[in-house]
Image (tube, helix red, strand yellow):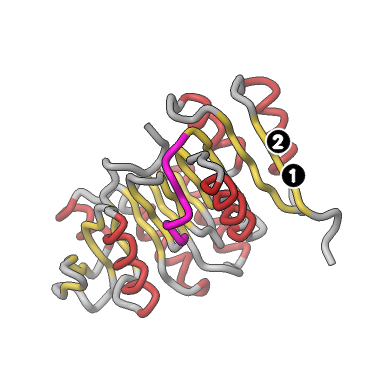
Amino acid sequence: MSILVGAQTKLVVQGMTGREGVFHTEQMLAYGTNVVAGVTPGKGGQSVLGVPVFNTVREAVEETGANASVLFVPAQHLKASAMEAIDACVPLVVTLAEHTPVQDIMYCRLLARERGVRLFGPNSFGIISPGKSKVGFMAHSIFSPGPVGLMSRSATNCYETVYLLTQRGIGQSTCIGIGGDMIPGTSFSEVLPDFQQDAQTEVIVIIGEIGGSGEERAAEYIKAHVTKPVVALIAGKNAP
């Protein structure tokens, strides 16, 4: 199986017509991700890489049935873009920008919970179910299908871990960028039930960072509810 993204994913790319949006949309399409729409206000009616562009997320959802969104927008525009996706009731929203204002993501996090939307990031590398679909900017060549479910606050530590696993013939079910900013839209403990229930995932890997208590809350949840083996790492003792 896998969690969150897969063959069922119909992706809308917000900010698709920008430089980063075009480049990574091309990469996601090449990987096999079903990118059904792009959104850039004022550029509706255009087509990029054969994908139709709409002015709003709501239009994109109504026309294409999109059920996931990834935001290639700068931090100062993340709140407005995320709110647009949440208002359109897109079930899965992945935000990539780093250094998003804390008040902005707090507001989006609250709104997402009220609407039943799963919000990942900010400062996430995205989500990938190897061999099925990728939503984000990760170097997909190092990922391989298999039984390890991985979630990380650090992109670099995730890539290194995945590379070592793949080199040893150990594939991954789904890899998730929780996000490295102060307040993530979704925590480790909120994803653990998905990995616990996923038939493909046999082992769970958590890569944390110093700061916050998300790892401690995850440990409490694991002790009470998770029966699969869990390997976890928090690098560093204190902030410089």
Residue positioned 37% across, 44% down in the render = 5
Q: Which mark is residue 57?
A: none
Residue 19: tell me if it is visible: yes
Tally of numbered discs: 2
Q: Which residue is mark 2?
A: 217
Please state the extent of the stretch shown in magenta in the rendering: 138-146
Q: Nearer the viewer, residue 80 or 72?
A: 72
Tell me: residue 170, above or below residue 123.
above
Quarter holding the C terminus is bottom right
Q: Are marks 1 and 2 in contact (CB under 8 Å)?
A: yes
x and y percentages locating residue 124 in the rendered image: 53, 58
x and y percentages locating residue 47 in the rendered image: 16, 72
Q: Which residue is mark 1?
A: 213
As helix, strand or loop, the secondary structure at mark 1 comes to loop
- Estimate how packed mark 2 is, as few (under 14), some (14 to 19) or many (20 or more) residues with alpha carbons within 10 Å: some
Q: Amino acid at mark 1?
A: Ser
* Left or right of 170, for residue 63: left
Quarter holding the N terminus is top left
* Left or right of 197, for residue 58: left
Q: Nearer the viewer, residue 118 or 163?
A: 163
Q: Is residue 144 magenta?
A: yes
